[in-house]
Image (spheres, rainbow, N blue to C red):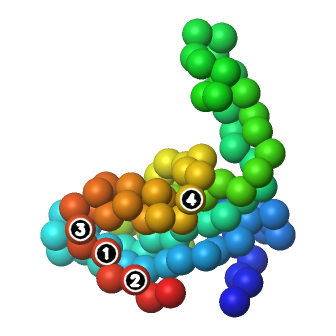
Amino acid sequence: MKQEAVVNHMSSEDWEVVKQGTWLYADEIVCGLRILRHGWYYGSGDYEDEESIREDREGEFYYIEYDSPTNPTEYKAGGGGYESLEEATAAAILATHGTISWLT
């Protein structure tokens, strides 16, 4: 199911929600999270980084966004540029201390 994502308050068909669920903030506040697929890896632009980190790349990459614990309609970037859904999923599980309940 393709679901259009709102990224940074802008609707974009370039971002696709591929997995979503909930997690526990401070082991008590239920918050949403989602993993999005995008066609670009955004490099750091830092000349001291390796080229694979510094430069933008076209391809299939995954980014994680978390609901704000104080405003459940606002997503915050939580990392990205993962090269597989499995890698992004593992990073989300680690960041949330294994408290995720996946919905999709």
Query: Residue at the top extreme?
Result: 48
Element at label 3 = loop
Quadrant of the frame with the N terminus:
bottom right
Residue 29, compared with residue 59, is above or below; it is: below
- Tell me how far mark 1 sits from mark 2, CA to CA: 6 Å
**What is the x, y in percent for residue 18?**
61, 76
- Tell me how far mark 3 sits from mark 4, CA to CA: 19 Å
Residues 41 and 83: in front is 83
Numbered label tally: 4
Residues 33 and 9: in front is 33
- Return the residue at label 4: 84
Which of pointers 3 and 4 lies earlier in the amino acid sequence?
4
- Return the residue at label 2: 102
Element at label 4 = loop
**What is the x, y in percent for residue 5?**
70, 72
- Return the residue at label 1: 100
Q: Is residue 43 visible?
A: yes
Residue 43 found in image quarter = top right
Tags 3 and 1 in contact by the CB under 8 Å rule? Answer: yes
Residues 44 and 88: in front is 88
Residue lying at 54% horizontally and 77% vertically, measured from the top left: 19
- Return the residue at label 3: 98
Element at label 1 = loop
Disc 1 marks a residue whose amino acid type is Ile
Disc 4 marks a residue whose amino acid type is Ser
Tags 4 and 2 in contact by the CB under 8 Å rule? Answer: no
**What is the x, y in percent for residue 16?**
71, 71
